[in-house]
Image (cartoon, coloured by chain):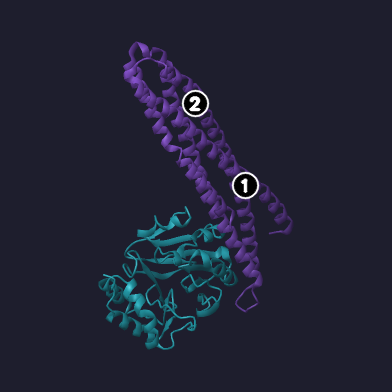
Chain colours: A purple, B cyan
Amino acid sequence: MSESSTLRSRVLGLHLAFERMLPFVTEAKRISVNAQVVAARLGEQGKPYAAVVVELGETASMLEDLIGQVASSFRLFVRSVADMGQQELRLHSYQRTSARIDRFPPEPWRKPENLAAAQSKFRHAIRTERARLLDSVSELARRIRDIELIVDEIRTVASRRSRFVAFVAMLESTKVEGERSEIETVSVGIGDLAERLSAASEDLRKRVRDLDEELDKLVREGHNQNIESQRGGN
Amino acid sequence: MKRELLFDDGDRRWVYFGRDPERPDTLIDTNEYLVIHGDKAMLPDPGGIEIFPQVAAEVSGEVAIENIEVLFASHQDPDIISSLFLWIGVCPGVRVLAPWTWTLFIPHFGSARPVTGIPDEGMTIELGKSSDIRAIPAHYVHASGMFTLYDPRAKILFSADIGAALLPETETDVFVKDFDRHVGYMEAFHRRWMPSNRAKNAWIDRVKDLDIEMMCPQHGSIFKGKDVERFLGWFQDLEVGNAV
């Protein structure tokens, strides 16, 4: 299996993990809106509630922004993996061509000077593609680290659960019977969302870390191969 | 790969490569041709990604690879031109010619290089110091934008998929030896792949009065001498577009 196809299968796993996070944005916004509605209905009794409602709204926006950043970084990452696939294809094709020329028996129509010049060209092309591949892998490693930082921020957002749990406890202690079910819905929603977001972002982080390690390994291997090929002249 | 020198008058050469024994069964067999004038070369329908190493290696013996001036694509199929980005990697200055209808599609094979569109009515192609090779319209035979090439000097018609045959492994002749038997290898392909009787006959009208000694298709065996006329007659009588 080529490096890019191994990466592609890992990227697919990462993509699926990331897609599981997308509904959280809508959910967070919905909970935020519900909380605002409940606060409005509570009137005076909802005033202590107000700051947390604002924070809930800000959290939903922050989540949306962060997931958006992951999405665009991810798109660039996927494009780089595709570029890498093409570079690998070029590298392998030129290597096969060069090997084939090496195996040619002499024939009257095969001009040795043409073959020698072609061989030189293909070997140069092989070195160029190897260098490009190494650059691509390094670029991917940088991008995945960017994604990792953003995912860490998402985990921070998810960890705000304890703050909202305290707020939910306060809500539940209010004596406004008519709003109890709406309050419960909001509180359950927050708790549940925070837990699932935490789990999803942890999964995403793990996959990102795995990919990071894989890319580091490829960068090291690429450097070693480059050194060897410079020694071997191909 | 088999190699056959089809024409050589000292300045102009046509070389054929094909029947690669290492070709995987999953790939359709293709004939590759190299046209050389002086020291400059053209590859009509240079082939797919998978056969690039074989074609590039063979071509490297015949001509300096940096002297490949033109890559001509008769149409857009992957077995014709998916190797484009590999050729551009080693011949960065090469000119790519294709029917104008496919100029925005062919770069999807991985090359961001512009492709020069051949207008519907065709054009002459400059190769080295020559400008007598003509792109002859063959639209809808089978692709909606399609050209065949005629070289009046070599009297060779490169017919792209027209005249193609799906040969069994046992049939390895470069040239058609028994036309009537060869029809059995061509008929199903032409009935199914050629969509339009009107378009097919229009192309036949364009080429039937040309002085052709060899008709070179992209698949199957090459037609020589009287077999060219036999093919055109057979093709004219054939009802095509049978999937509708």
Subunit bearing disc 1: A
Q: Position of residue A221 (x, y in %)?
A: 67, 50
> Which secondary structure, mark 1?
helix
Considering every residue shown, the one lying at the far right of the view is A231
Q: Is residue B223 above or below residue A207?
A: below
Q: Which residue is mark 2?
A: A161
Q: Quadrant of residue A61?
A: top left
Which mark is nearer the camera, 1 or 2? 2
For label 1, count other residues whose C-alpha is less than 10 Å away and answer few (under 14), some (14-19) or many (20+): some
What is the distance, in whole Å, between disc 1 and disc 2 at their CAs? 33 Å
Q: Nearer the viewer, residue A174 or A154?
A: A174
Q: Quadrant of residue A41?
A: top left
Q: Position of residue B200 (x, y in %)?
A: 29, 73
* Residue A202 located left or right of residue B147: right
Residue at (64% x, 49% y) in the render: A218
Q: Amino acid at mark 2?
A: Arg
* Disc marking residue A4: none
Q: Is residue A89 above or below residue B2?
A: above
Q: Which residue is mark 1?
A: A214
Q: Is residue A29 above or below residue A12?
A: above
Considering every residue shown, the one lying at the far top of the view is A44
Residue B129 appears in the picture as rendered? no
Q: Amino acid at mark 1?
A: Glu
Q: Position of residue A59 (x, y in %)?
A: 45, 25
Q: Nearer the viewer, residue A163 or B164?
A: A163
> Which secondary structure, mark 2?
helix
Residue at (53% x, 31% y) in the render: A155
Q: Is residue A202 above or below residue B142?
A: above
For label 2, count other residues whose C-alpha is less than 10 Å away and answer few (under 14), some (14-19) or many (20+): some
Mark 1 in CB contact with mark 2 (< 8 angstroms) = no
Residue B110 appears in the picture as rendered? yes
